[in-house]
Image (cartoon, rainbow, N blue to C red):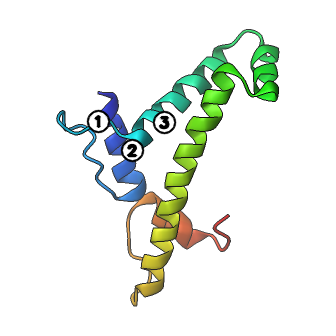
Amino acid sequence: MRRFSFDIIYKFSFEIDTECFIPYFPESNLADSFDLASKLLVQRIMSSLPLIWKLKRLLNIGSEKKLKEAIEVVDNVVMEMIEQKRREMATMTMGLNKSDLLSRFMGSIEDDN
């Protein structure tokens, strides 16, 4: 179910079919990193003592180190997609007609950062 949910979110956001829900496909590093980051963020929110996760983040240890690494993986893949979308937009003659979320965001802002 997790793989199916990720595939739907990915398809809607980036108009790319990852086919993560197909059982014989290997695990996706992006899907695993996205799932781990989501899980760790929920644990952080549910923490009764925010001081603990803040200290872990400051020292870059434990779950905060894993969260940082997972976010870096997701961030790198998304930046690659943005670069690819930029190249597609530069070669389009009709402008941006895509219906995916990333194209809409990129079409509505002037600064990609």
Q: Residue at x 63, y 70 (%)?
A: 109
Above or below residue 81? Residue 108 is below
Above or below residue 106? Residue 17 is above
Of marks 3 and 2, the one in the foreground: 3
Q: Position of residue 98 (x, y in %)?
A: 38, 70
Residue with the mark numbered 2: 9
Secondary structure type for disc 2 = helix
Disc sitting over residue 33 in the figure: 3
Q: Is tag 1's residue or tag 2's residue first in the polypeptide sequence? A: 1
Of marks 3 and 1, the one in the foreground: 3
Q: Position of residue 50 (x, y in %)?
A: 78, 17
Q: Residue at x 40, y 90 (%)?
A: 93
Above or below residue 71? Residue 75 is below
Residue with the mark numbered 1: 4
Q: In the figure, is residue 58 to the left or right of 79?
A: right
Distance (Cα) linking label 3 and label 1: 15 Å
